[in-house]
Amino acid sequence: MGSPVNEPAYDGIFSIGYRNGSATFQASYETFKAIGFQSFNIRGGKVFELVRNFKLIPMAGVGMTLREPNWAKRLTPSLDLSLQPEYHFRNWFVFLRAESRYRGDLDRIVNSGFFGTGVKI
C-alpha cells in the first residue's frame, strides 16, 4: 500500500510462539528491505477465551530495531503494547493485532494494525 514516505514494497513479519494454558510468548522478526528496516521483538501476554474458538490476548513486548540508512547503522530499542483477537479453527487460526510501539529509531510512538494466520503444531 505504501505511505507518504515510501512506495509500496514487501514488509514481512515472521513469528514463532509458545502457549501454555493462559500464558503466551512470541518472538518475531520483521524485514522491510525497501527502507533498510529490520526489527526483532519478544512479547508475552495472557490468553482470555471469550467464547468457543474466540480468544483475546493483551500483550507487552520489547525489541530492537536496526535501521540502515546510507549514512549509518543504528540499533535502537522499542517497547510495545498490543491487543490480539484470534479465531481458531481445527489446526490453524486467524488474528488481528492492534499495536502501539515506542520506536527508538523515530523517538515516538507508532500505532499499527496487522492481520495474519497461524498454524498450531
Image (cartoon, rainbow, N blue to C red):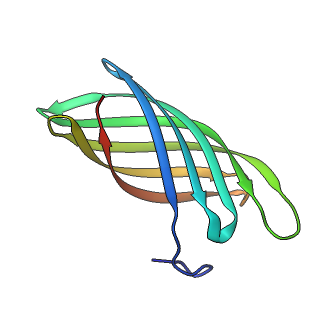
Q: Which of 93 and 4 is in front in this view?
A: 93
Q: Quadrant of residue 80?
A: top right
Q: Which residue lies furthest to the top in this view?
A: 21
Q: Residue at x 79, y 67 (%)?
A: 69
Q: Residue at x 62, y 43 (%)?
A: 40
Query: Which quarter of the picture shows residue 38?
Result: bottom right
Residue 23 spot, x, y in % from top left: 38, 21
**Residue 89's x, y, as percent?**
15, 39
Where 38 sits versus 22, above or below?
below
Q: Residue drawn 77% across and 62% down?
A: 68
Compare residues 24 and 57 and report the one nearer the observer: 24
Q: How many marks?
A: 0
Q: Residue furthest front?
A: 121
Front residue (pair 104, 7):
7
Q: Can you tell which quarter of the image residue 109 is in?
A: bottom right
Quarter occupied by the C terminus: top left
Q: In this view, does 37 lie to the left or right of 50?
A: right
Task: Kindly give the residue lying farthest to the left in the view shown.
Answer: 52
Q: Residue at x 56, y 46 (%)?
A: 29
Q: In which quarter of the image is the N terminus?
A: bottom left
Q: Residue furthest right?
A: 71
Residue 72, position in %: x, y? 87, 62
Left or right of residue 21: residue 14? right
Coordinates of residue 57 in the picture (x, y in percent):
34, 35
